[in-house]
Image (tube, rainbow, N blue to C red):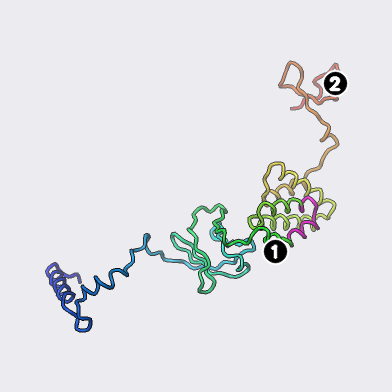
Amino acid sequence: MPICAPGQRVARECVERINSRPHSRFGISRRERFERVEKAALKPFPAVQFDVGEWKDAKLHPDCYIQLESVYYSAPHIHRGKRLRVKVTEHHLEIFLELERLAIHPRCRHRDGRRIKIDAHFAPASEAYYEATPQKLLSQSRFIHAELHRLVVDLFNADVYGNIRRVQGLVRSAAKELQTHGRERASVHLEAAITQMRHFDKVRVPYFQMLLTQARHHKPGPTDATREIVRLPGNPMLRYVRGVAAADPAHPHQEKLK
């Protein structure tokens, strides 16, 4: 039941009288003790309101990131492979190992696979290259195909931790191609797909898988490399195949291409 205005005034007067009265134990009033001792120890209110947190579990991947809501957050590399607890609030994301907080990040709302990192969480690149996971991937790629191995080496030279997940996907897809179609056919598919990725500077696992699918269905014809389309003189809209139309001068348009 709310206190009426007169009741509030009486309560304030009572509190003021109590705070101004000398305390029998301290020899000074409560107000004086607050001003001398307690006031200096006060801290300002937090800049943001208290966030109610939601707890989740996550595993720290070999690339030193956990994944949450399609965003990657880093944690110290010495804890890779461990199950961690993650507290997610409106503004922050905190990563814990039991009761120890390992990292705190601003929460990212862009669910586009971006990476939120703290540089101190990662071992130097010179050490990372020779760790177990990168070396295992290098060994696997060397067995599958020489071009795949060269691609993995280039990716790891650029950024070991940043490319571990990508290399794992590439190696996994290539190994499946090898097991399904045999080394001879798979080697042709892999080389074509890797050449295409390098040409367009688009090294992505889904794109690699799509290129492998296209390579399986592509049947090169005998004229694929030699066929040359030439515009007819005087009419840039008409075309013929060099060497075919020229064989019969009486019918220069006999091999027009639609």
Q: Which mark is residue 218?
A: none
- Which one is in front, 22 or 57? 22
> Residue flagged by tag 1: what amino acid is it?
Glu
Magenta stretch, main secondary structure, is helix
Query: In the picture provided, is 51 more to the left or to the right than 5?
Result: right
Residue at the right extreme of this rendering: 247
Q: Is residue 103 magenta?
A: no
Which residue is denoted by mark 2 in the rendering? 246
Is residue 31 shown above or below 172? Answer: below
- Which residue is depicted at the point 83% across and 54% down? 183
* Image quadrant in which you'd find residue 247: top right
Residue 153 lies, in percent from the top left, at 73, 53
Which residue is denoted by mark 1 in the rendering? 131
- Which residue is depicted at the point 80% across and 52% down? 146
Residue 68 lies, in percent from the top left, at 54, 61
What crowding class fits label 2: few (fewer than 14 Cα within 10 Å), some (14-19), or many (20 or more)?
some
Quick one: quadrant of the C terminus? top right
- Which one is in front, 212 or 131? 131
